Image (cartoon, rainbow, N blue to C red):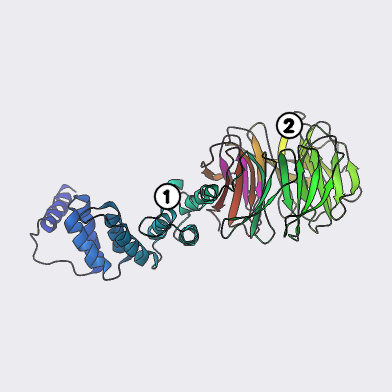
Amino acid sequence: MRITTVIILALTLCILNSGCNSEPSTAEDQFNLGEQYYNATDWEKAVKWYRLAAEQGFDAAQFSLGEVYRRGYGVSQDDTEAVKWYRLAAEQGHVDALNKLGDMYRYGYGVSRNRKEAIKWYRLAVESPKSGKLGMDMGEDPGEELGDLVVPTVSKLGAEHTRPVMSVAFSPDGQRIVSGSDDNLIKIWNTNTMELVYTLKGHIGCVYSVAFSPDGQRIVSGSSDRSIKIWDANTGETIKTLTGYTSSPTSIDFSPLSQRFVSCGNFSDVVWIHDANTGKVLKTLIGLKGNLNSVTFSPDGKKILGGGNGGLMIWDANTGQVLTPQNTSVESNYDALTVAFRPDGKRFVSGGESGNLQTWSFSSGDSFSIWKTLEGHKGEVNSVAFDPNGKLIISGSNDKTIKIWDANTGEVLQTFKKHKGGVNSVAFSPNGKRFVSGSEDHRIRVWYTPVNR
C-alpha cells in the first residue's frame, strides 16, 4: 500500500515538473492534468491544459475554463469570455454550466441582465436527468435557484405582496398561480415568465384562502372581511360577492366538476356548500364540535372532509349527513389545521399544532384511523397536499421549512429551508413536477419537485 502511494506521488511530480517525455493527447487526460495544476495553484498551466481539452469539445474543461475567466485565475478576469465557455459546456448539457449561465443572466455578468433567459437556463439545469436527485445538497441544486429568482425579480417591479402570503394555488393547466395575502390583495402570476398578470382588489381584510375552479375559469377567495368573492380568472373582474358570514372564511375548495364549492370559517363549527355559479348556500353542515380550520372535497366529489380543534369529520356532499361513525378513532384533543385527500380517495393527511402529520386510512365504510404519524417539523403544520400520483406529501410549517415525504413509508425525502418566515400554504402543480409555497416573509416561491420526477 505504501509503495503504491509513493509511485502515484512520483508520477504526479513527474508530470507537474515536466519530467516526463510524453504529453497527454486525449481531451480527458488534458483536463485531468489541468485539474492537477489547478489544485497545485499553478493557474497558467491549468488554463493551458483546460484550453487544449476545451477546444476538443470536452464539456468539463469548457466549464472549468469559464470558471478561471470568471475568477481571473491565470488570465485576466473576463465575464464575457466566461459566458462563452459556460455556454459551450451548457450546450452539451453540463449541469453546472447550465446553472452558471443562469447566474450570469440573472445578475448581468458578461451579458445584459435578462430574467427570462436566466429562467430558461435554470429550467434546463433542473430538468436535466443529472440534476435534482434525491440527497443533493440544496445549496447546489439548481431547483433552488429558480425558486429564489421568482420574487426578488418581481420585487424590483413593485409587484410583490407587502404582507404575509396566506394561500397559493396552481391553475388546472399549471400555467398560472393565484396568491392571497394579508395585504388584502389577490395576485395571479404566469408560471412560465414568473410575471404578474393581474392584481385583484376588493377585499378589505386579509385574504385567507384562494382556489381555482377545476375548469380554470373562476377563482374563489375568502377573507377576514367575512366575505367570499367569485372572480373571473381570465379578466380579474369580480363576478359576485357573498356576505353575511358570522366568521371569516378561512378555507375554500371546489368540487371536481366546478359546480359547487365548500367553505368554512374560523371560530365557527359550520361548513357551507355553495352553488359555484350563483354563490347561493345549498347546504349547511354541522356536527364537528369546535372551530373548523380546513375543509375539502373528496376526489370523486361525494364526500367532504373537515378538520378543526374538535378533530376530523366526514359528511355526505349531497345530503349533508355526517358519515363519520361515533367510534372513529380521533383523539379528542386533536387539532387539525389542514387536511387533504389522496387522489384515489382511499387515504387523507392532516397536519396540526403538534408539528406532526397524520396519514389516515379508511378501515371499513367511512371509519378511519391513523395509518402513520410523520414526525419532523418543529412548529405547527399549516398546509399539506398530496402530489397527483399520491406518492408524495408536501407540508409547510411555522418552523419556516417545507418538507416532502414518501406517502407510503412516511420518510422525509427532502427539507427546503429558503423561507425566512413560517410557511402558510403549499400546493403541487397539476403534473406534480413543481410546487409553490407562500410564507409569512411575504414571498411566493416556485420549486421543482426534486424526487420522483
Q: For the residue marked with disc 1, what is the amino acid?
A: Glu
- The residue sitting at 20% across, 62% down in the picture is 49
- The residue sitting at 63% across, 38% down in the picture is 164
User: In the image, 244: left or right of 24?
Assistant: right
Secondary element type, mark 2:
loop
Alpha carbon separation for disc pair 1 and 2: 39 Å
Residue that mark 2 sits on: 334
Residue 109 location (% of width, % of height): 37, 55
Which stretch is magenta?
385-403
Q: For the residue marked with disc 2, what is the amino acid?
A: Tyr
* Residue 245 can be seen, yes or no: yes
Secondary element type, mark 1:
helix
Say if the magenta span includes residue 387.
yes
Disc nearer the start of the sequence (1/2):
1
Residue 312 occupies which quadrant of the picture? Answer: top right
Residue that mark 1 sits on: 140
Say if the magenta span includes residue 194.
no
